[in-house]
């Protein structure tokens, strides 16, 4: 089954598209062959409207309605083009994340999440069924609705002690540095995982770079490298209850908006600007990621044990960090992150393991579309009988447009692993019982 995933992150820099061919065998191994990925720039005027509608802006319902339609039409155009550009015209299903406008979190609880980009426009343009609105079902089940990438990370990076694949013992941290940074801690195959948003990834850096240079981001980390970290400002920024809150947790531009830095620094460093401010914000991202990793790893409860030995001690050491997202292109940020990681912890990019760093989110939604089409839950198993998002139960994510029955059969067995395949599946016979 070929699924096209569409997404646009909190930076609103482009619509990302990625197509993958999925084959699920009776052994519970899901093989995903990436077919290609690309991105389509937002029309400048529409991008400006989206950015102006983000928190803390107050937006009337007329603007929300217009944006829902315009974003849906743009996703439809991108999807139609991507079907030809990355999938050779052969796509069975489109999975669209849409554009997040608001993620409603109060304290430790998520209450709702709004992604615009009406799926009817996408279905009309692509002439394919569309699964969209992936977050709300998890929130309704008591989860954070984010980060959803934990299911991909758990299946992809779970270490199988019976089939050594070069993965180190201990925990792997899948880190995506988009506008907001998120992490999944993964141990052995089928063991519970923990996923959470660490806080700002690129969003505060991008805002400052844009104000200083007109560039949408700190290209090659040059501004951050040229500046000096202001320790008083860093302490003020770190003094936020979000960073001390327990995982799982989620956040967004609702907290880390354009007013965040001026408000936090008003009483300590109101005049901090230029490269020194960018260096300080880069340090903030690195510190909150690293401290979150170490804190959560050490707090993993004792019931998170080896899948094969109920008496095994929990593995609490983070042995490798696999980075994806726009932040993976910022060498200054990666250098500062590496400085905070413990000795012996390997830092590598996702493309070193076969996953394109700029397309992981789009491939995630392709995967979620495949799972939803087959009636499979879109969240990973978490600790204490919860899901990785904190939800009370596993939920099949998303809504189907148009609301007609899908032709693909439900898969009732467990999915144990995700294997990235680089050769066409047709070169070898498909195992009996495989779902395509």
Image: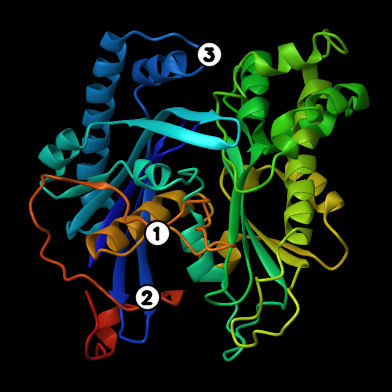
SS assignment at label 3? loop
User: Which of marks 3 and 2 precedes in the sequence?
Assistant: 2
For disc 1, the marked residue is 394
| Mark 3 neighbour class, 10 Å CA radius: few under 14, some 14 to 19, many 20 or more | some
The C terminus, quarter of image: bottom left
| Mark 2 neighbour class, 10 Å CA radius: few under 14, some 14 to 19, many 20 or more | some
Front residue (pair 278, 416): 416
Q: Tell me: 301 left or right of 74.
A: right
Q: CA distance from mark 2 to mark 3?
A: 42 Å
Q: CA distance from mark 1 to mark 2?
A: 22 Å
Q: CA distance from mark 3 to mark 1?
A: 33 Å
Which residue is located at x 62 percent, y 87 percent?
Answer: 161
- Residue 144: where, in percent of width, then height? 50, 43
Residue 141 seen: yes
Q: Is there CB contact under 8 Å for labels 3 and 1?
A: no
Which residue is located at x 40 percent, y 20 percent?
Answer: 50
Between disc 1 and disc 2, the foreground one is 1
Q: Name above or below for residue 91 compared with residue 201.
A: below
Q: Tell me: 165 left or right of 231.
A: left
Between disc 2 and disc 3, the foreground one is 3
Residue 31 bears which disc, if any?
2
For disc 3, the marked residue is 56
Q: Name above or below for residue 321 compared with residue 339.
A: below
* Residue, far right: 231
User: Which of marks 2 and 1 precedes in the sequence?
Assistant: 2
Which residue is located at x 68 percent, y 38 percent?
Answer: 220
SS assignment at label 2? strand
- Residue 256: where, in percent of width, then height? 62, 25
Front residue (pair 70, 428): 70
């Amino acid at each position: 089954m070929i699924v096209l995933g569409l997404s646009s992150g909190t930076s609103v820099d482009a619509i990302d598209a990625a197509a993958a061919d999925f084959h699920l065998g009776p052994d519970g191994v899901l093989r995903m062959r990436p077919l290609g990925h690309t991105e389509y720039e937002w029309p400048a005027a529409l991008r400006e409207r989206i950015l102006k509608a983000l928190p803390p802006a107050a937006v009337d319902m007329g603007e929300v309605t217009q944006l829902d339609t315009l974003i849906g039409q743009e996703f439809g155009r991108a999807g139609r083009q991507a079907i030809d550009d990355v999938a050779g015209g052969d796509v069975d299903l489109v999975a669209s994340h849409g554009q997040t406008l608001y993620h409603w979190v109060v304290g430790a609880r998520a209450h709702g999440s709004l992604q615009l980009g009406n799926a009817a426009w996408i279905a009309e343009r692509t002439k394919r069924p569309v699964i969209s609105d992936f977050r709300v079902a998890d929130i309704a089940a008591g989860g954070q609705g984010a980060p959803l990438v934990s299911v991909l990370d758990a299946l992809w990076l779970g270490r199988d002690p019976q089939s050594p694949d070069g993965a180190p013992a201990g925990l792997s941290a899948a880190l995506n540095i988009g506008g907001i940074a998120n992490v999944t801690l993964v141990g052995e195959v089928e063991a519970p995982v923990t996923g959470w948003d660490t806080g700002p990834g690129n969003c505060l850096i991008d805002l400052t770079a844009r104000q200083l240079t007109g560039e949408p981001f700190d290209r090659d980390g040059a501004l951050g490298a040229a500046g000096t970290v202001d320790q008083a400002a860093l302490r003020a920024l770190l003094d936020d209850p979000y960073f001390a809150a327990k995982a799982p947790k989620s956040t967004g531009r609702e907290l880390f908006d354009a007013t965040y830095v001026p408000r936090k620094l008003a009483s300590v460093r109101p005049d901090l600007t230029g490269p020194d401010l960018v260096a300080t914000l880069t340090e903030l991202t690195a510190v909150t990621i690293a401290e979150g990793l170490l804190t959560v790893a050490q707090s993993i409860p004792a019931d998170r044990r080896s899948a094969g030995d109920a008496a095994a001690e929990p593995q609490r050491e983070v042995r490798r960090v696999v980075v994806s997202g726009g932040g993976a292109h910022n060498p200054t940020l990666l250098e500062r992150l590496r400085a905070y990681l413990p000795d012996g912890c390997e830092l590598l990019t996702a493309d070193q393991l076969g996953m394109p760093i700029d397309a992981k989110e789009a491939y995630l939604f392709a995967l979620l579309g495949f799972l939803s089409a087959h009636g499979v839950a879109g969240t990973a198993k978490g600790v204490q009988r919860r899901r990785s998002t904190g939800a009370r139960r596993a939920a099949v994510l998303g809504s189907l447009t148009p609301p007609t029955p899908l032709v693909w059969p439900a898969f009732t067995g467990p999915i144990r692993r995700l294997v990235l395949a680089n050769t066409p599946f047709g070169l070898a016979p498909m195992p009996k019982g495989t779902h395509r």
